[in-house]
Amino acid sequence: MLIVPEREIANLMTREAAFDAVEKVFAAMASDDARNFPVVREAIGHEDALYGFKGGFDRAGLTLGLKAGGYWPHNLEKHELINHQSTVFLFDPDTGRAKAMVGGNLLTALRTAAASSVSIKHLAREDAKVIGMIGAGHQATFQLRAALEQRRFEKVIGWNYHPEMLPNIEKVATEAGLPFEAVDLPGMAEADVIITITSAFAPSLMADHVSPGTHIACMGTDTKGKQEVETALLGRATVFTDEVAQSISIGEAQHAIQDLSLRPEDIIQLGRVINGSHEGRTSDDEITLFDGTGVGLQDLAVAAAVVDLAVEKGISIEVDF
Ligand code: NAD
């Protein structure tokens, strides 16, 4: 069995490799070559932790496994460890033997950033110039950095519930040589692409904050009860997702389904646009919205890519198991 420790991931994994892995597995999911298994997420009654598994099998890429982990809210103060902790386990699909154990923390950030980038590549207008960020936490910096590679953006605008955090995303814009402007929510109307990446349980972005032709990637809502945008916006937009079952149960669409702004059959798997079985955006005025809920197959895809890179560079640890 091979081990790729968390400390090696930053040197091995690139945004490009994460993007390719996620784009491929989204396409495989839409062609029924890959499927996610039901998610397990439990409060364990210890340290206030939420722990669970996201697994699946990609028959096209021959990747089988799961990500185990969750959220330990007291890690930082008690143990000087980050609160989100995860590990990916890969198995040989021919025999069921354990194949690899891979640090999953940085990979989670990279695969999540790759998902919104894949949606921008396939759904945003080609002439998109202004990108708007709602959220300025840990994950927002990854989303923005990856998104900037998809179009010739000329400006970054941002709004955050905690305005003191906005310098986090301003720094990413500045590093990319782009001007940054803090705006109020109606100011988001200037954006051609908007990424929402917050842990909110009530909507910030309303339907009338968004201009025709905008692409929105809703990335923060990955649990029952969370919500970032008004349901009327999903009613107005053409809605795409990584996986419909997750979108309607734990994703942004959960609320729009409940108040009947949207029907499950109206939600399109992004993989269908990637593999050409759906046309995607059909006009410059259309609002497209990607509900990125985060699927196990994304984790397995980037972990498999990193194992290949580690073997290639001779830095994986091999144990007789
Ligand atoms: P973080 O704690 O670093 O940042 C949280 C962000 O949410 C900050 O911008 C904060 O200001 C904002 N926020 C907090 N309370 C808010 C409120 N009431 N209203 C509006 N905004 C509020 O967290 P992070 O690591 O950046 O993660 C952000 C979200 O993304 C979390 O909900 C996380 O679960 C989710 N996430 C989703 C995926 C996925 O695949 N879809 C993957 C990773 C993380």
Image (cartoon, grey):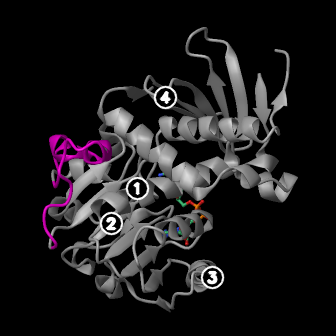
SS class of the residue under badge 1? helix
The mark that comes first in sequence, 4 or 1, is 4
Q: Which mark is residue 175?
A: 3
Residue 21 position (above or below residue 199): above
Q: Could you tell me residue 16's position as x and y percent?
A: 55, 56
- Cα distance, mark 4 to mark 2? 29 Å
Labels 3 & 4 near each other (Cβ < 8 A) = no
The mark that comes first in sequence, 3 or 2, is 3
- Cα distance, mark 3 to mark 4? 35 Å
Return the residue found at the far top: 95
SS class of the residue under badge 4? loop
Kindly identify the amino acid type of the residue bearing the numbered disc 1: Val
Nearer the viewer's eye, disc 3 or disc 2?
3
Kindly identify the amino acid type of the residue bearing the numbered disc 3: Glu
Return the residue found at the far front: 312
**Which residue bears the numbered disc 1?**
118
SS class of the residue under badge 2? strand
Can residue 46 be seen from the camera position used here? no
Kindly identify the amino acid type of the residue bearing the numbered disc 4: Gly
User: How many other residues sit within 10 Å of disc 4, few (<14), some (14-19) or many (≥20)?
Assistant: some
Nearer the viewer's eye, disc 3 or disc 4?
4
**Which residue bears the numbered disc 2?**
216
Q: Could you tell me residue 218's position as x and y percent?
A: 38, 60
- The residue that appears at 21% across and 73% down in the rendered structure is 213
Residue 63 position (above or below residue 107): above
- Which segment did they paint magenta? 261-284
The mark that comes first in sequence, 1 or 2, is 1
Instruction: From the viewer's perspective, tell me whether residue 290 is left or right of residue 160.
Output: left
